[in-house]
Image (tube, rainbow, N blue to C red):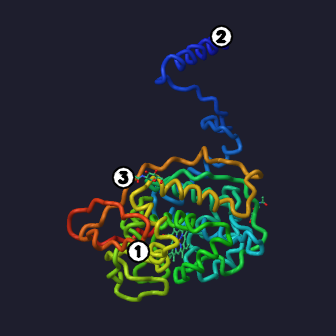
Amino acid sequence: MAFTGLRAFAVIAALAVASNAAPALDTRALCPDGVNRVNNLQCCRFIPVRDALISEIFEGQCGENAHSTVRIAFHDAIGFSTRGGKGGGADGSMIAFGATELAFAANAGIDEIVEDLQPFADAHGVSYGDIIQFGSSVALSLCPGAPLVQTFVGRRNATAPAPDGTVPDPFNPVTQILARMADAGFSPAEVIALLASHSIAAQDEIEPNIARSPFDSTPDSFDTQVFLEVLLKGNVLPGGLGPGEGEVLSPLEGEFRLESDAAFARDPRTACTWQSFVANQSLMSRQFATAMAKLGLLGQNSRQLVDCTEIIPRAKPATRTAAIIPAGKTRQDIEASCAQSAFPNLQTARGPPATVPPVPEQ
Ligand code: HEM
Ligand SMILES: *[C@@H]1O[C@H](CO)[C@@H](O)[C@H](O)[C@H]1NC(C)=O
Ligand SMILES: *[C@@H]1O[C@H](CO)[C@@H](O)[C@H](O)[C@H]1NC(C)=O
């Protein structure tokens, strides 16, 4: 048997040299489950966690729960300051100290995903910091166009809640949000890269009468559409009420625009980064991946963690590399705001103007 095995190995090795088409030998270690192979055996235990997250929490979709998990990844991690004294960063304190942090106004609505993730983490013996950041990377893998985000596990339980005031509000001026984000270690360009997350987003809390209204017309796809649509002239108050605090006019029926997104798209400090993503899916997703990996390590020491990026599934590619002007709009509707470079040429969708449907509730 050993002899045959060795001969088979020699044949496979020879084939691999002879032809690029021959299957490469899998040298990765076999997990205790006897099925999965990994480079780092410490990642094995997260494979069933990944699979259960996808089937039980996300239901296989880039839907509400996947979106909410990316949002909680931000709200948990940003409870941090490079100067200290503002919480432990990506440590799961949003769940462990939910009685404190979920009561902060900026965390409105986060309680729903905590209700799902807390018992899930407990059942799988995973720390809250890990379930949030690992979960966010797995959630993104369900959204076409999303990048693979470098993902670590092994965070310890939080020891204290973050104080109020670490999470930006959509009615805060750009200067204030940039200052808060700088305090946590992010440049203005990184803030805009992180806002690619609003490509898979909807609101519930500002205008509850139009619950689940998305920030772009394609909330189940991690595409560049949000960077174009936020720049379109606003003329609609979706739902007819309001505007709520932090809401401004949107360009499309059913679509919701945050005051802060509108301001970032037009502010001289951030407008050119914003515009650079409109027709450049790969630039947007790469910059987001880098900033998101940094977010997931706030307050953590990566040398004390385990890199399990290898078990995060790859998302399908986005259908387009550039945003498309929604039907009924023209180039004249774009409030181009970058003084240094021309606005890219884009295709226009045909047909009658469409109403953006809400993200289905999960
Ligand atoms: C920097 C300033 C930011 C502000 C002012 C802001 C504000 C908001 C607001 C008001 C909502 C709607 C919440 C609701 O009513 O349910 C929202 C949703 C969301 N945000 Fe942000 N956000 C910011 C940055 C970020 C960042 C950095 C991320 C992630 C990296 C993020 C990810 C999301 C996601 C995924 C949603 C959708 C949640 C869902 O549909 O369930 N946001 N954001
Ligand atoms: C983290 O806290 C949970 C309960 O909140 C507990 O079950 C778990 O053992 C703790 N993990 C560590 C590493 O202390
Ligand atoms: C996307 O951005 C990168 C980096 O700036 C640039 O090299 C590339 O040419 C851009 N692609 C398009 C289609 O604009």
Q: Say which residue appears at 31% left-offset and 60% top-offset.
A: 346
Return the residue at label 3. Answer: 319
- Figure quadrant of residue 329: bottom left
The label number, if any, that marks residue 95 in the structure image = none
The label number, if any, that marks residue 3 in the structure image = 2
Q: Say which residue appears at 38% left-offset and 82% top-offset.
A: 249
As drawn, 107 above or below 53 = below
Badge 3 crowding class, 10 Å Cα cut-off, few under 14, some 14 to 19, many 20 or more, is few
As drawn, 41 above or below 294 = above
Badge 2 crowding class, 10 Å Cα cut-off, few under 14, some 14 to 19, many 20 or more, is few
Q: Nearer the viewer, residue 325 or 307?
A: 325
Q: Earlier in the sequence, mark 2 or mark 3?
A: 2
Residue 189: x, y in percent?
55, 65
Measured in 3D between alpha carbons, the distance from the residue under mark 1 to the one under mark 3, in whole angstroms, is: 22 Å
Q: Mark 3: which amino acid?
A: Thr
Residue 10: x, y in percent?
60, 14
Is the distance from the Cβ of mark 1 to the nearest ligand 1 atom less than 8 Å? no
Q: Earlier in the sequence, mark 1 or mark 2?
A: 2
Is 297 displayed left or right of 347 in the figure?
right
As drawn, 206 above or below 67 = below
Q: Mark 2: which amino acid?
A: Phe
Residue 320: x, y in percent?
36, 54
Return the residue at label 1. Answer: 213
Secondary structure, mark 2, is helix
Q: Say which residue appears at 75% left-offset and 63% top-offset.
A: 157
Is 40 displayed left or right of 220 in the figure?
right
Q: Nearer the viewer, residue 127 or 80?
A: 80
